[in-house]
Amino acid sequence: MTEIPHGLIKGQVIERTDWTDNLFSLTVKAPIDAYQAGQFTKLALLDSQGEWLRRAYSMVNHPSHKLGTDCMEFLIIQDDAGKLSPLLNNLNVGESIFVGKTPSGFMTLAEIPTTSKDLWLLATGTAIGPFLAMLGEGQALQRFDNIVLVHAVRTEAELVYANRIQQLVDTLAGKLHFIAIVSRELVEGTLQGRIPDFIKSGELEAQLPVKLDKSRSFIYLCGNPGMVKDTSNTLVELGYNKHLRKAAGQFSYENYW
């Protein structure tokens, strides 16, 4: 077999969930290094020409979930124009996959200023994954008075992990508020449109018992680059600053491709 590149280790798919024809979750068992909720690692496979294909994916699960610290769940959408995701979509339980041994990423609760009392988690598509991991932090979430989770997708079928989200809402009674946004369908109980437009118009806040406030809010953006860019620009227009380790701000982001 082709030599495994430095930094990758062999793992095995132990569980698979299909949400739609091209949206699925894989749970992988591999002895990677310790990670924090919100971080990501690489998934890799060999293509038919013997070339290694790899891409970063965030863990959906909290590190201490019931399957153990060496089991990681990933939410993946097949990009027909991509090279790796179609191969990942062909994987079944029991098959091998390669995983980056050392996780990365700074989108974690530890990076949020201690003065922040309301946490806003704004995601598009599969980028809800790292936020679900964060919401498994338990005691670490007690520092926040309110947590807002927003998931924006194209179709109702892409509103994944509905049961898990409801369990989190129930567990974090009165603290966690969930808003679903569907852009291409009219779905009862959801908003129709885009995250930056709803922030600019105030419609997002109108759905919630908590308001954006520069003195107490911290916003994480994660998802497609268009949403991240437009929402960042909207927040700057409203007087919010990007968070830096050397200069605390009110928002930060991670592009998801």
Image (tube, rainbow, N blue to C red):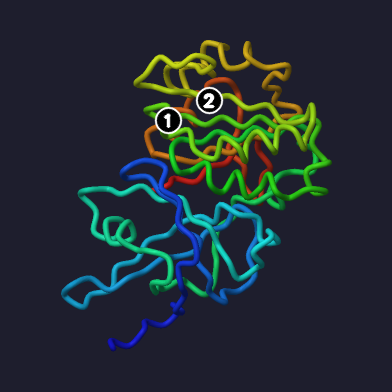
Disc 2 to disc 1, C-alpha distance: 8 Å
Q: What residue did someone put label 1 on?
A: 153
Q: Is residue 208 left or right of residue 19?
A: right
Residue 29 in the image: x percent, y percent?
A: 53, 70
Q: Is residue 47 left or right of residue 37?
A: left
What amino acid type is highlighted by mark number 1?
A: Val
Earlier-in-chain disc, 2 versus 1: 1
The label shown at residue 140 is none
Relative depth, front residue between 244 and 48: 48
What amino acid type is highlighted by mark number 2?
A: Ala
Residue 144 in the image: x percent, y percent?
A: 79, 36
- The residue at 24%/53% (across/down) is 82
Residue 4, quarter of picture = bottom left
Query: As displayed, is residue 86 above or below residue 170?
Result: below
- The residue at 52%/21% (across/down) is 237
Helix, strand or loop under label 1: strand
- The residue at 39%/72% (across/down) is 95
Query: As displayed, is residue 97 above or below residue 145?
Result: below
**Quadrant where the image shows the N terminus:** bottom left
Residue 39, quarter of picture = bottom right
Q: What residue did someone put label 2 on?
A: 180
- The residue at 57%/77% (across/down) is 31
Q: Is residue 98 left or right of residue 32?
A: left
Helix, strand or loop under label 2: strand
Query: As displayed, is residue 218 above or below residue 212?
Result: below
State if disc 1 and disc 2 touch (CB < 8 Å): yes
